[in-house]
Structure formats: structure tokens, C-alpha cells
């Protein structure tokens, strides 16, 4: 019987101390952390940073503006704002002249509270409208003229008309020189009722409508020929004879009558 006990003990030992099983090995492998592999760096992808970039030329800063350029830019900006304000004011005045002050368009055209229009631009426009008579200096002279031609310009023309009418009571706006085209038929009728003589040149027999004129160049030629022939001026001879008769030495030159005034109408 002793051999039987040993055999049981050995079997018990084998059962109480078993070898490593497959499940235990799998658990140990699962608990082990995987090792990370380092990335392989390719030499072509390496970027080298050197100090050579500091040697590149620096970008020059913007040129500093002079005070005159800054002032000019401010003036241009101000003029643009004033121009926009004038356009807006002209639209407001045109709407007021057409539909009256109760028009809803006035409310829409009023600038908002936060607008960039200078606060004194409307007072400046009011001074321009009521200050002087000349509106040529305004940028929108035609619009302003159309707005105010029925207000103060009409009064100005009315004053001039009344002064001229007082000095010339016979003046009428539809008379000459504005109605010359309408007066031509009447003038032709008057001329036909009072015909003029048909004067002609004694040499060529052409009609003469104007009196002969005094040719000073021809007079110089006549004087040169008369002096060469020993003849004197008839005027000097008349002056000498008058002095011999005892007349005053200082006399005003007498104006000779025009010999052609009998035939032709005076143009003066």
C-alpha cells in the first residue's frame, strides 16, 4: 500500500503546483504596453535655419508725409464733405419749393444724427443764399438760380425795371430792339410810301446809297501836285484875307456844312 500513497501525493503535488497555463500567458501579454517606434527622419525634409535670413534687406518704412501734404488731404476731405452737404441742402430746398414745408420728403432728406456733415455747413449755406446777389461762385449755380429766381432775383429785376421806366416812360418790352424782325414789314411799308431819289455815279452809272467820303490820301496827292505847280492852299488864302479885313486873330475853327446832307440822311 505504500506505493499507492506516493502516487497520490505526486498527483496532488502536480495538481497544487500546476505549470503556466495558456490563459496566464495571454493575460501577461495583454498587460504589456506596446513600444512606440521613433519616426524615421528623411534627410531631404530637414529644414536648416541659419542666420543668413538676417542679412536680407529690410523693407523701408513708408515715407513720412510733410505738413503741407497732410493739410491738403484734410482740405480735400473737408471740401468733399461740404459738397455732399450742399447737394443734400439743394435737394431739401427743391422739395420745399415744390411741395411746401409739410412734405414728407424733407424728413427723409434730413441728415441723421451721426452723419459726417459739419454742423456749421447749413448756416454757411444760409449765409451764401441770403448774403450776396451773385451766385456764380456757387458750385451748383444753376440749381440755386432755379430755386431763388422767383424770390429775390425777381425783386431785383423789378427794381431795375421801375427805375428805367421812370427815366423812359415810353419804354415797352415788346418794342425794339427785341422785335426788329416784326418791325421790318412795317418799315418796308413806310419806305414804299416815301420813295427816295435814285442817285447814281456820273461815271459808271451805278446806284449810290451812301454819301461820298473824304479821301485823305487823295488830298495829300492833290496838295503835293499843287505845291509843285506853285499853287497855295485855298484855306490859307481865305484866312489871310479875313485878317486883312480886321477880324480877330483868335477864332474858333468854323465847321463847314456837309455838302451831301441835302441828298443823304445823316448817320449820327
Image: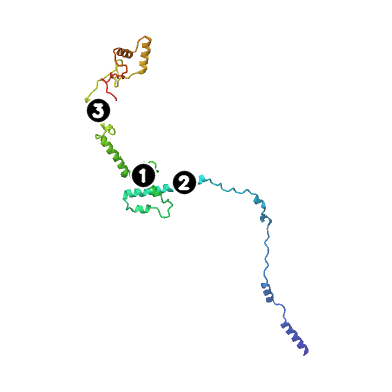
Q: Residue at x 36, y 18 (%)?
A: 216
Dot 1 lies on which element? helix
Q: Residue 131 bears which disc, if any?
A: 1
Observer-nearest residue: 258 or 80? 258
Q: Quadrant of the C terminus?
A: top left
Look at the picture and state if 193 lies above or below 40.
above
The spot of residue 208 in percent (x, y) is: 29, 20
Tell me if mark 1 has few (under 14), some (14-19) or many (20+) residues whose alpha carbon lies within 10 angstroms of its own. few
Q: Nearer the viewer, mark 1 or mark 3?
A: 1
Q: Position of residue 222 (x, y in %)?
A: 36, 13
Q: Nearer the viewer, mark 2 or mark 3?
A: 2
Which residue is at 73% across, 85% downward?
12
Front position in the image: 160 or 5: 160
Q: Earlier in the sequence, mark 1 or mark 3?
A: 1
Where does residue 181 sit, x and y in percent of width and height?
28, 32
| Count of number-bearing discs | 3
- Whether residue 53 is situated above or below residue 25 in the rendered picture: above
Q: Which residue is mark 3?
A: 188
Q: Residue at x 52, y 46 (%)?
A: 67
Element marked by disc 3? helix
Q: Quadrant of residue 33?
A: bottom right
Q: Please indicate, yes or no, whether residue 173 appears anywhere in the rendered image.
A: no
SS for tag 2? helix
Q: Are marks 1 and 2 in contact (CB under 8 Å)?
A: no
Task: Work out whether mark 2 precedes mark 3 in sequence or the reverse, and give the earlier one.
Answer: 2
Distance between mark 1 and mark 3 Cα atoms: 51 Å
Which residue, given by chain and number where applicable, does mark 2 sit on? 75
* x then y, percent, for residue 88: 39, 49
Amino acid at each position: 500500500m505504500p506505493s499507492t500513497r506516493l502516487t497520490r501525493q505526486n498527483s496532488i503535488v502536480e495538481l497544487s503546483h500546476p505549470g503556466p497555463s495558456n490563459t496566464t500567458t495571454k493575460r501577461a501579454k495583454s498587460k504589456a504596453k506596446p513600444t512606440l517606434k521613433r519616426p524615421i527622419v528623411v534627410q531631404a525634409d530637414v529644414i536648416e535655419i541659419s542666420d543668413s535670413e538676417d542679412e536680407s534687406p529690410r523693407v523701408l518704412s513708408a515715407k513720412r508725409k510733410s505738413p503741407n501734404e497732410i493739410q491738403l488731404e484734410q482740405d480735400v476731405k473737408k471740401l468733399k464733405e461740404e459738397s455732399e452737404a450742399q447737394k443734400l441742402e439743394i435737394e431739401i430746398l427743391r422739395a420745399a419749393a415744390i411741395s411746401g414745408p409739410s412734405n414728407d420728403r424733407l424728413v427723409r432728406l434730413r441728415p441723421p444724427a451721426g452723419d459726417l456733415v459739419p454742423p456749421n455747413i447749413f448756416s454757411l449755406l444760409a449765409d451764401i443764399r441770403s448774403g450776396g446777389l451773385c451766385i456764380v461762385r456757387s458750385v451748383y449755380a444753376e440749381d440755386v438760380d432755379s430755386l431763388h429766381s422767383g424770390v429775390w432775383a425777381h425783386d431785383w429785376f423789378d427794381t431795375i425795371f421801375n427805375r428805367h421806366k421812370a427815366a423812359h416812360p415810353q419804354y415797352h418790352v415788346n418794342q425794339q430792339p427785341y422785335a426788329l424782325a416784326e418791325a421790318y414789314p412795317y418799315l418796308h411799308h413806310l419806305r414804299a410810301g416815301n420813295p427816295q431819289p435814285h442817285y447814281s455815279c456820273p461815271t459808271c452809272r451805278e446806284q449810290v446809297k451812301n454819301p461820298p467820303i473824304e479821301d485823305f490820301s487823295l488830298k495829300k496827292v492833290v496838295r503835293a501836285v499843287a505845291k509843285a505847280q506853285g499853287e497855295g492852299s485855298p484855306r490859307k488864302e481865305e484866312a489871310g484875307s479875313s485878317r486883312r479885313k480886321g477880324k480877330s486873330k483868335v477864332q474858333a475853327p468854323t465847321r463847314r456844312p456837309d455838302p451831301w446832307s441835302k441828298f443823304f440822311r445823316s448817320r449820327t
